Image (tube, grey):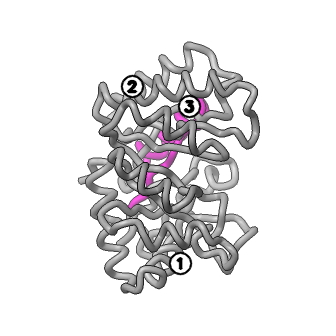
Amino acid sequence: MLIDTHVHLNNDALYEDAEHYIKKANDQGVERLIVIGYDPVMNQRAIDLAEKYANVYASVGMHPTYVKNHKESDIKAFTEQLSHPKVRAIGECGLDYHWDKDNADEQIAIFKKQIELSKKLDMPLSIHMRDATEDTYETLRPYAPLKGVMHCYSGSAQMAEKFMELGLYVSLGGPVTFKNAKKPKEVAKIVPLDKLLVETDAPFLAPHPYRGKQNDSSYLPLIAQAIADLKETDFETIALKTTNNAKTLFNLE
């Protein structure tokens, strides 16, 4: 059994055929999926999917690339959605300087609001970080200890250790299978099993040998196996440990 802790089944590429992709995942031993919202439309879609399918859960929040378009009512809306029984996390939130660094201060301000909600409600964060490692760490650090996960972590092994010291899990996705991806492989080797999660981030970042194609949750075993190889252990150990970690972090039955 595996749990895909970060999938965008609400994305247009997957949404209309969600039932097909859920069954496809189930057939490969991926029994539960956490659908991640990131703006008002995708937050609601995540909840709709979680309401429709028993093995699907939702996360709602505001992605840093949406910040420049946000209205104060958006924050109020997803804050109210956090009380939904199948919403189990806040996010995808964080910092992204790859696409836009001009609004860094606003990104940080919105990120802090979501961190504060996490602390107030005792809900985990699903944290996005791209080209913003230092600012992400410095924004999180004053709030430690934290509950959450560095989603599809792309930073260094050294910084992974610092994020884990804040109380966070580290999640790895398709890039850990890429032949030229040194950082994710180094991270996979050093993250303790009790701090490790797996994800697809579908429809993005399909693992080898499907790199460049549309991703879906059925490919999660390829990611787990790659991590098992790097850690010199077996698939079953990775599946068991990451599933138990996901159940603990996201309060899954």
Write the residue at 32% across / 79% down: 237
Please, what is the three-letter code of the amino acid marked with disc 2?
Glu
Magenta segment includes 40: yes
Mark 1 near mark 2, Cβ–Cβ under 8 Å?
Answer: no
Number of other residues with Cα within 10 Å of mark 2, as a class: few under 14, some 14 to 19, many 20 or more: few
- 218, 146: nearer the viewer: 146
**How much space separates mark 1 and mark 3, taking CA atoms?**
29 Å
Query: Which quadrant of the view contains residue 216?
Result: bottom right
Number of other residues with Cα within 10 Å of mark 1, as a class: few under 14, some 14 to 19, many 20 or more: many
Where does the magenta region start and end?
Answer: 32-52
Provide the secondary structure element on which disc 2 rests: helix
In the depicted structure, whether residue 245 falls above or below residue 237: above
**How much space separates mark 1 and mark 2, taking CA atoms?**
35 Å
Magenta residues: mostly which secondary structure? helix
Write the residue at 64% across / 65% down: 215
Write the residue at 36% across / 44% down: 166
Mark 1 near mark 3, Cβ–Cβ under 8 Å?
Answer: no
Could you tell which of marks 1 and 2 lies nearer the N-terminus? 2
The location of residue 52, given as percent across then percent down, is 43, 47
Provide the secondary structure element on which disc 3 rests: loop
Residue 24 visible? The answer is no
- Disc on res. 222: 1
Which quadrant is home to the N terminus? bottom left
Mark 2 near mark 3, Cβ–Cβ under 8 Å?
Answer: no
Question: Disc 2 designates what residue?
Answer: 116
> In the displayed image of the protein, which residue is found farthest to the left?
253
In the depicted structure, whether residue 159 falls above or below residue 211: above
Question: Disc 3 designates what residue?
Answer: 62
The location of residue 9, given as percent across then percent down, is 57, 52
The location of residue 28, given as percent across then percent down, is 47, 76
